[in-house]
Amino acid sequence: MPAAPRPAILLCALAASVTAAADPGVYPQLRGAGLGEGRSVWIANCEGCHGYGVAGAPVPMKPADWRERLAKGKSVLYAHAINGFFGPDDTLMPERGGNPELSDAQVRAAVDYMTALAVYYIQQER
Amino acid sequence: MKHSRKTVLALGVAASAIALTTAIAGTDAGSTPSITPKAMADALHLVMDSDRTIYTRKIVNRLVKKDKVIKASEHFEDDKALVLPAQMFRFGSELVAKRAEDMPDVNFSYSLQSLWPVNKQNAPKTEAEKAGLKYVADNKGQNYYTEETLGGKKYFTAVYADTGVAPVCVSCHNEHKDSPRRDFKLGDVMGGVVIRIPLDG
């Protein structure tokens, strides 16, 4: 299946990059407790779907995907990421992103980075 | 699972795609329909991918994962289970090929291929297929378009990434005895849909 087009904002800012998987540097290193580890976990386990909108995964570079999700609060997002979640259109977020070896703390760190990334792009849009 | 690499798409689907694309372009499809090979391929892939996505979400995800009333299995007959989404796609392409045998004007093809096929029949054959599958795997989020000449005829060939979207996709390929690659993870490009359209009338 074709992945969703990369957000224009990302393409403009990082025109030289071709794929995030080949060049994880396209994703900003954000300041905050645990965000460095979260970024590494996110790139290794989450970016494959969330970086492209695969299977309906919300893309943090697309503010429209995240405004309502951020409003749910971190505890809900942590629970969805750790336990798995069925979206209203029967989309499926697999538990721990499909990697059972991830600890709760690692998943929470990845969620922290993804939500920080979403906030970053929402702020960029303004 | 039997699979004919060269399959032909049914007129109904093709007509829908033409109508879709011409509607987008604002052209009167009833008089002088006009469509580029790329737009045609994109429209066809949109139909295929959407149908497969809905099957995955509304049938497999809902009944297998959420309501837990039935399984989905590669061995669906023995297991009395649902077919996997990739099998659904292949069965559709096989039926299309069979039905199109009586429709000589319908002469373009599509297939699901991989550089790491569980079934060797699904490996790329032409240089364009090989290049396209490598490109979509190396350049995630992008499609591959080219022209190639086969048997003296010129074709437009498009390749679209096929991504592992559910844990079962990944585990099946990683654990299958015939799989040549066992390090897939969720979200990886595992293969591609190849659509080929003749350019010479």
Image (cartoon, rainbow, N blue to C red):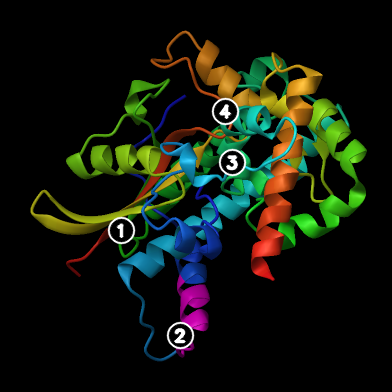
Residue B158 belongs to the span the image colors magenta = no
Q: Residue at x 66, y 68 (%)?
A: A125
Q: Which residues are magenta?
A: B18-28
Q: Closest to the observer: B67 or B8?
A: B67
- Disc 1 + disc 3, Cβ < 8 Å: no
* Residue B154, placed above or below residue B80: below
Labels 1, 2: one chain: yes
> Which quadrant does the C terminus of chain B fall into?
bottom left
Rounded to the nearest whole Å, what is the CA distance between mark 1 and mark 2?
A: 20 Å
Residue B118 as seen in the image, left or right of residue A8: left
Report the residue marked by disc 4.
Answer: A44
* Separation of marks 2 and 3 at Cα, in angstroms: 50 Å
Amino acid tagged 1: Asn
Disc 2 or disc 3, which is closer to the eye? Answer: 3
Amino acid on which disc 3 is placed? Gln
Name the residue beneath numbered marker 3. A29
Q: Nearer the viewer, mark 4 or mark 2?
A: 4
Amino acid carrying mark 2 in the image = Ala
Percent position of residue B149, x then y: 13, 53
Q: Residue B19: within the magenta?
A: yes
Q: Secondary structure at mark 2?
A: loop
Compare residues A85 and B92 and report the one nearer the observer. A85
For the point 73% across and 38% down, the residue is A32
Name the residue that disc number 2 marks. B29
- The residue singled out by tag 1 in the image is B107
For the residues bearing labels 2 and 3, Cβ distance under 8 angstroms = no
